[in-house]
Amino acid sequence: MVMTASLKAQDPIPPASTIRMEKRPFAPVAIPTDLGAHGATVNTRRGETIALAFDGNEAVFVVRSGTLMLTVTLPHGLRQVVSLFYPGDLFRSAFAPSDAGATLSVVRPGEVLRMRWSAFSELASSDPETTDYMSSAIARQNASQAIHMAAVGRFDCQQRMATLLLELALRTGSPSSCGGLIFDVPLSRRDMADYLGLNADTLSRTMSRLRSSGLLSHPDRHRALVPDIADLAKLTPAARSLMALHGQSTAEMSPFTTV
Amino acid sequence: MVMTASLKAQDPIPPASTIRMEKRPFAPVAIPTDLGAHGATVNTRRGETIALAFDGNEAVFVVRSGTLMLTVTLPHGLRQVVSLFYPGDLFRSAFAPSDAGATLSVVRPGEVLRMRWSAFSELASSDPETTDYMSSAIARQNASQAIHMAAVGRFDCQQRMATLLLELALRTGSPSSCGGLIFDVPLSRRDMADYLGLNADTLSRTMSRLRSSGLLSHPDRHRALVPDIADLAKLTPAARSLMALHGQSTAEMSPFTTV
DNA sequence: CGGAGCGTTGAACGACCTCAAAAGGTGTGG
DNA sequence: CCACACCTTTTGAGGTCGTTCAACGCTCCG
């Protein structure tokens, strides 16, 4: 069966309605309860590196709480933080390129579920809930990665910074008592810079500028307070996309919570 | 069951042996033959835009031959080519972020298999071959994306250019009669620039420099000849990783070929 | 012929990087 | 509790690489 017709989409930027289908594609699917029984729960500590292999086997990691970071280090000391994994995210060790100095490490402590890929894929083939969870987690993460790609490839320093802050705020932020959103900034300047493809010095300067313009303040190290999230959103062209992706989820995702 | 111990990996850059497991993680899995019966084969034409939705439903695309391109366009005309899809690659419309002006378009004509996501996922749940194919394709593509991320985030202009050329050479190149590798360069300068997070002018200049240094020549528009691929590889820090990822596959992947 | 689109090239500018120095934080041992 | 070493962060001054803008050539097509 070969069909060439009716394939074209004239609109270079399809309206949102074309993309949103029966179900909202990015509606989070809860981590299946069963998964806990098949994998080991690991308490992660800040800064810790998590081995990608598990007894020499490929592994799967499901973030229950906290945040992980995938880093790649290429020759000449070129380091790139490829992606961040938040609660509900799934990572398979084969997602990391070999021969590229890939490391998975903890930026925010929490609980991670770990199991062999073989065990996970077997479970997925028998349990539709797990299959659904996996598909939707991977889809959401890929979409998120696309935005990140655009930010690193096309945004200027301030836009990238704003994008990261908005991402953190949307994912891990909670309303503060004095209005605004408060959230952890668990990454060091260097990690943030490597995530955004920037120099750490430049990033620090940009951060200072944001702080002095009142968009942001630091109640303490590793935390940030954004008085008005809308002001921050104005600074990044990716605001709408980020909201669409993870606007709704504010709470940590536990295996027993259906969001 | 909670275990905190034996989780750390001391080595920031784990040796290749840690990553390569029972099976080579990136060994290509052939496109299942069954897939052809469940989806429509679409002949794609250069420049054509492929609708992400299929009768209002989410869709899956499997590249049999040719090359596709996923582009994101954010406000202010910021355009980023997020990834390229080569034969054997799989794309699901939910991988594209909504509200981000995502388009899937054809850069190299060929055959694409298209079906509803619902149909595909149903097939995957009953046919292990399809499940395996999907998992491995997604893993390979994620790994590839990680390299791309590092290139855009950290490489200078020449390194990015060399990375793209090497990627194209490894994926679609064939030995030329006069020695060296010959391959299609189906992307326009602007598309290449948007893929690499560069300005088209800058890219053109860099290309000219590579050409005048004899690393590369253009037998005709949209084709490139690299006399010595090793020389090109020396220019990019991602050479080893790219080789590891898709060093072996030179031929187009057909649904009837087991590579 | 005229126009649109793509690719190339040059000159000038500016955003980000590099390098260096100082300030601030954290952890350890006395 | 302090002293010390060590690391991260900040900030400045200067340099660089990529961008911007504009002009020109080429090809395709009406």
Image: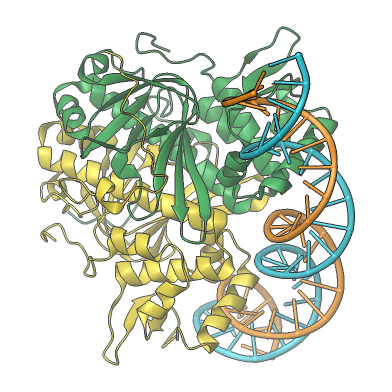
Chain colours: A green, B yellow, C orange, D cyan
User: Which sits in the foreground, A184 or A101?
Assistant: A101
Q: Position of residue A10 (x, y in %)?
A: 49, 52
Instruction: Say whether residue B53 is left or right of residue A12.
Output: left
Instruction: Report if residue B51 is visible in the image.
Output: no
Residue pictured at 29% horizontal, 45% vertical:
B139
Quadrant of the image containing the C terminus of chain B: bottom left
Residue at the image position 78 percent from the left and 28 percent from the top: A215
Drawn side of residue A136 relative to residue A18, left or right = left
The front one of A10 and A259 is A259
Whether B208 is drawn above or below A88: the answer is below
Depth check: give the residue in front, A231 or A16: A231
Please give left or right for residue A129 compared with residue A27 in the image: left
Quick check: A192 above or below B184?
Answer: above
Residue B49 sits in quarter: bottom left
Say whether residue A171 is left or right of residue B237: right
Question: Is residue B223 visible in the rendered structure shown here?
Answer: yes
What residue is rendered at 50% in x and 36% in y? B98
Residue B132 percent across, percent down from the top left:
17, 42
